[in-house]
Amino acid sequence: MTKMTHGRIPRGLVSVRADGGSQPDVKALVESLNKAFADFKAEHTKQLEEIKKGSADALQALKVDNINADITRLQAAVDQANTQMAAFQMGGGSAGGGGVADAEYTDAFRAHFRRGEVQSALNKGAANEGGYLAPVEWDRSITDRLVIVSDMRQLATVQPCSGEGLTKLFNTGGTASGWVGEAAPRPQTGTAQFAALSFGWGEIYANPAATQQLLDDAEIDLEAWLAGEVELEFAKQEGDGFFSGNGVNKPFGILTYVDGGANAAKHPFGAIKAVNSGVAAGINGDSIIDLVYDLPSAFTAGAKFAMNRKTQGAVRKLKDGQGNYLWQPSLVAGQPSTLAGFPVQDVAATPDVAANAIAMLFGDFKQTYTVYDRKGVRVLRDPYTNKPYVMFYTTKRVGGGVHNPEPMRALKIAASA
């Protein structure tokens, strides 16, 4: 997809990505995944037996790694299909969902997109700037697409808001009580204290370009093209912000709230607690069990693991004390793989397994992290800056941060204390 980034003029015309196409056979993917995992267990057992005998076979290890890589690819395909199914069930991609909610304004937006025509009487665009707030259906379409490609939007609570920012008040406790007799005096008791918590905010943008001739002559769905460009750019920026953002013109990332992180002392309730992996540069099975049971039972109903694919490849080899693998593949369509009985979410933004890294999160993300969307996407049509290209400067203001660290735990790669 050709696009304009940081002042560079795109070479040639844009290409258009089709949203349609055949849906993957999820059942076949799940069957292939389970067969691959059965082969993995058999070959991994042979590898462990050879190691015990003191005759480790490099070819056998390579075979195990290759099967493990195949499982990773199959699991990624299953996860993607499951996400698409869930988005469809939630009403994602609202095409076919009835008429346009704001047809008159949507028509004006399309005319503005092609030719720069503005119906200022509608009072929804900034005619003097040539900019428009996106129509309701188009805005919703971008949001739905972001849910599919943005890990944190799948995991966390997403809250629209209309103000400049947001600050929450937290009750830090302090209310006291006591036992008294029937006629005993009732002295004043302690009163609860409050603490404020603010969230990091920023603006993300995409700046795709097309020639005016393409806009004049194309029979393609130009709005769908623009939505695709916005999806890719916004998702890339959000992935960094929601997980490791420093709060400077971007959200506060969830990883920064973990013990030892930059925002460990930011929340009134404290930091996200970390559990050591038990190995200086790796993970053992006991640390997974420790991580699960360190989380209070009140939060386990909605708990999930979040890790990247490399980490999944490592934990796939872990067993419990009875020799059972802790990781299990998807058994039916629509269900994710599990680790120690809990769903696993593939999150590329989490670090790899390395000394002192936070390689895994476990808990209820919806009760932990909130993404705040400032209502409305804004599109500024710019036909002047880089002729013959027409730029579509598209922005959205987004915030985020941990609203409660208690439902979350982190796995830190470190030997046990």
Image (cartoon, helix red, strand yellow):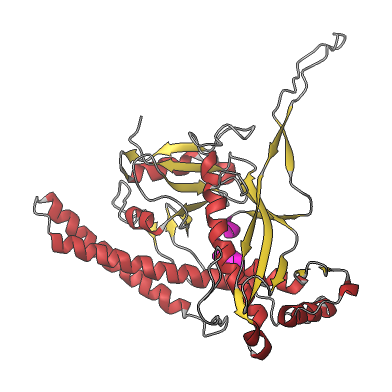
Left or right of residue 338: residue 237: right
Report the residue that reaches farthest toward the right: 121
Write down the region rendered in magenta.
146-155
Q: Is residue 382 above or below residue 215?
A: above
Quadrant of the image containing the C terminus: top left
Height in image: 151 above or below 225? above
The image quarter containing residue 129 is bottom right
Residue 71 percent coordinates (x, y): 34, 67
347 vs 215: above or below: above
Q: Is residue 143 magenta?
A: no
Q: Quadrant of residue 314?
A: bottom left
Q: Main secondary structure of the magenta part?
A: helix
- Residue at horizontal 35 percent and vertical 48 percent from the top: 353
Identified at 61% across, 68% down, the residue is 207
Does residue 406 sit above or below 347 in this rendering? above
Left or right, residue 98 beside residue 396: right
Q: Nearer the viewer, residue 218 or 155?
A: 218
Res. 331 in view: no
Q: Kindly indicate the quadrant of the structure image that contains residue 388.
A: bottom right
Q: Position of residue 106 (x, y in %)?
A: 79, 78
Q: Position of residue 301 (x, y in %)?
A: 57, 50
Could you tell me which residue is drawn at 34 percent across and 41 percent down?
Answer: 355
Is residue 54 visible in the rendered image? The answer is: yes
